[in-house]
Image: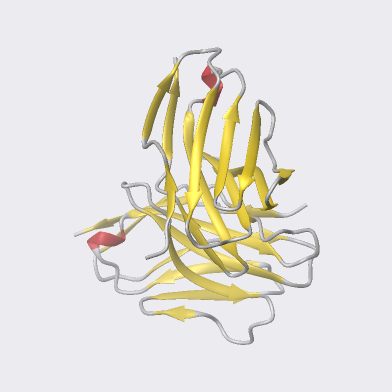
């Protein structure tokens, strides 16, 4: 069975510091995709970054990078130079690329990040 | 701008009522999903659909049903609402790599 685990219910970081949000996953599929979403208090789900299982390099998008360690089945999100607007809930998610997966996303429980001035 | 629209932002219903949550997308996506979000549990998949009139159970389908008569519309139905179905409900649509979420419906069952 597929599973996403986020072990940090809450994290805080000082403004301008870097922070790492942990995500581990479990799947037997050889091909899959990993996502990170941000959910501010308004409730919208904002896509941050994507990593394919066959991608050789770690994904980066501006201040966001994904530390992908395939052998450890981890896909940690690193936010550099934190800003007050980064305070939100963060979800790690996985999509199976197997036949019959229908592109459904499986989510972790989330990590609430608070950025302090 | 592409959109997934959920008909209600907030909804209050009584126990035992039949409740319809509507979701419409304008991107011609094949796949549509319904999730519920609860604190500490993240988003859990209730049902999804990969084509018109096609549906599959997700991880927590009990107490719910769905309808997809047209490609753009995916409805979640609570046949007889119960207090343990009080939650935030999120609809999403996808075309392989891209997922778009609606803004959510916060349902309270009293």
In terms of image quadrants, where is residue B31? bottom right
Taking the spot 44% from the left edge, 71% from the top edge, the residue there is A78
Front in this rendered view, residue A22 or A31 = A31
Q: Residue at x 47, y 58 (%)?
A: B26
Q: Which quadrant would residue A2 be assigned to in this image? A: bottom right
Q: Residue furthest front?
A: B70
State the image coordinates of residue A7 (x, y, percent, origin top left): 55, 51
* Residue B109: % across, % down: 46, 19
Vertical arrangement, residue A17 with respect to residue A85, above or below: below
Out of A23 and A99, give the one closest to the viewer: A99
Q: Position of residue A15 (x, y in %)?
A: 24, 65
Residue A73 visible in this rendered orientation of the protein? yes
Taking B105 as reference, is A87 left or right? left
Q: Is residue B64 left or right of residue A87?
A: right
- Residue at the spot 42% in from the left edge and 48% down from the top edge: B5
Residue positioned 46% across, 14% down in the render: B14
Q: Is residue B39 visible?
A: no
Q: Is residue A71 left or right of residue B42?
A: right
Image quarter of the C terminus of chain A: bottom left
């Amino acid at each position: 069975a597929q599973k996403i685990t986020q072990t940090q219910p809450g994290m805080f970081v000082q403004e301008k510091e870097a922070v790492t949000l942990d995500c581990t996953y479990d799947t037997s599929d050889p091909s899959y995709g990993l996502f990170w979403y941000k959910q501010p208090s308004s409730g919208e789900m904002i896509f941050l970054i994507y990593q394919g299982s066959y991608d050789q390099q770690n994904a980066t998008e501006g201040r966001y990078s994904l530390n992908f360690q395939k052998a450890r089945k981890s896909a940690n999100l690193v936010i550099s130079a934190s800003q007050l607007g980064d305070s939100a809930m963060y979800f790690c998610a996985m999509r199976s690329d197997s036949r019959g997966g229908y592109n459904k996303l499986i989510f972790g429980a989330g990590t609430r990040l608070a950025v302090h001035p | 701008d592409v959109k997934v629209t959920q008909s209600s932002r907030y909804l209050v219903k009584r126990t035992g009522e039949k409740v319809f949550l509507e979701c419409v997308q304008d991107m011609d996506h094949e796949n549509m999903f319904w999730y519920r979000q609860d604190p500490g549990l993240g988003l859990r998949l209730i049902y999804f659909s990969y084509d018109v009139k096609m549906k599959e159970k997700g991880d927590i389908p009990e107490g719910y049903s769905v309808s997809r008569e047209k490609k753009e519309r995916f409805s979640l139905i609570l046949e007889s609402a119960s207090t343990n179905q009080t939650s935030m409900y999120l609809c999403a649509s996808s075309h392989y790599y891209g997922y778009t979420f609606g803004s959510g419906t916060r349902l309270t069952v009293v």
